[in-house]
Image (cartoon, rainbow, N blue to C red):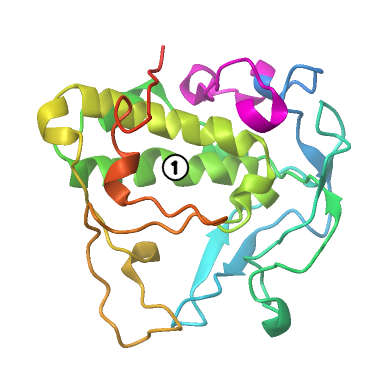
Amino acid sequence: MRNECNYKGYLPYWDNARFSEDPLSSAMWSGAPDSFGGNGIFLENDHGPYQKILPGLANPNFTLPAPAGTGGGCITNGPFVDFKISLGPVAKAVIDPSNKYGLKPNPRCLSRNFDPQSSIGVLTWANATTIVSSPNITALRTNVERLWHKNSHTFIGKEGADPFSTTNDPAFYLLHAQIDRLYGIWQGQDLKNREYATDGPRTFLGLPLDTAPNVPTSSVELDDVMDLGLGYKPRLKEGLPMTKGGMCYIYE
């Protein structure tokens, strides 16, 4: 953002808990020129509930459920109202084998499908406190997913809720800055023992992939290589510290 777009500011995070009980009152979704825009227009036949298939898994019938939202269509205000995206969608009710991962050009508007119930009573200060109070990395990962991560995506809906192409929505970066912030707060409470703590399988939910259905899934290790595209393949351990290896940032 700084090198290619001349961005001079900071990367803000989505302060979910501050508006968890009335998320639409947040300036982030106001539709003002300095917001991230609001909800998509309501589509009678395309606002959910959904059962989306995730391609790439050995079990072709594994679906990701999503509740009915309050929009479904293009956003109508804010700075991204004319924003055009192309990749995806990927997780759909029916997968086209010729375009399994949505890589073919598909120009369209940015759509959202706000689900306030995914925020109310969930994205709260109490749950944020539970997350940063997790006694170990296994509990942290479980609490982040159970209490925060999935519901943040589900609240936005549409592009923001597609596990493969969620980055199409600029709000993704604020959402994950908050996840990283909570992780950073937890990590900083015992940096010596938590800076390089790892947990979890190498595949989504530990499920076998269709390219290797009989290969047992295994836990991540610090020297695992992450292929992030465009030739960037850092090792897992390079992404964990906030103040080493070229990283130098903190959250206010």
Direction top: furthest residue:
252
Crowding at dot 1, Cα within 10 Å, few <14 / some 14-19 / many 20+, comes out as some
Q: Position of residue 229 (x, y in %)?
A: 54, 57
Assess whether residue 5 is covered by the magenta stretch.
Answer: yes
Please name the residue shown 29% across and 83% down the image: 215
Residue of label 1: 149
Q: Residue furthest bottom?
A: 214
Say which residue appears at 49% left-offset and 43% top-offset: 151
Describe residue 120's horizontal placement relative to residue 204 as left or right. Answer: right
Looking at the rendering, which quadrant does residue 113 occupy?
A: top right
* Quarter the C terminus occupies: top left
Residue 237 among magenta residues = no
Question: Can you see residue 242?
Answer: yes
Q: Position of residue 5 (x, y in %)?
A: 71, 29
Left or right of 1? Residue 131 is: left
**x then y, percent, for residue 136:** 15, 39
Q: Secondary structure at mark 1?
A: helix
Q: Nearer the viewer, residue 116 or 153?
A: 153
Q: Residue at x 64, y 62 (%)?
A: 50
Q: What amino acid is found at the position of numbered circle 1 in the picture? A: His
Indicate the quadrant containing the N terminus: top left, top right, bottom left or bottom right.
top right
Which residue is at the front of the view, 75 or 214? 214
Q: Is residue 11 left or right of residue 127?
A: right
Q: Residue at x 82, y 62 (%)?
A: 106
Q: How many marks?
A: 1
**Which corner quadrant of the image does residue 182 belong to?**
top left
Q: Give the magenta-colored segment's residue range.
A: 1-27
Instruction: Report which quarter residue 194 is drawn in.
Output: top left
Res 1 seen here: no
x then y, percent, for residue 181: 39, 26
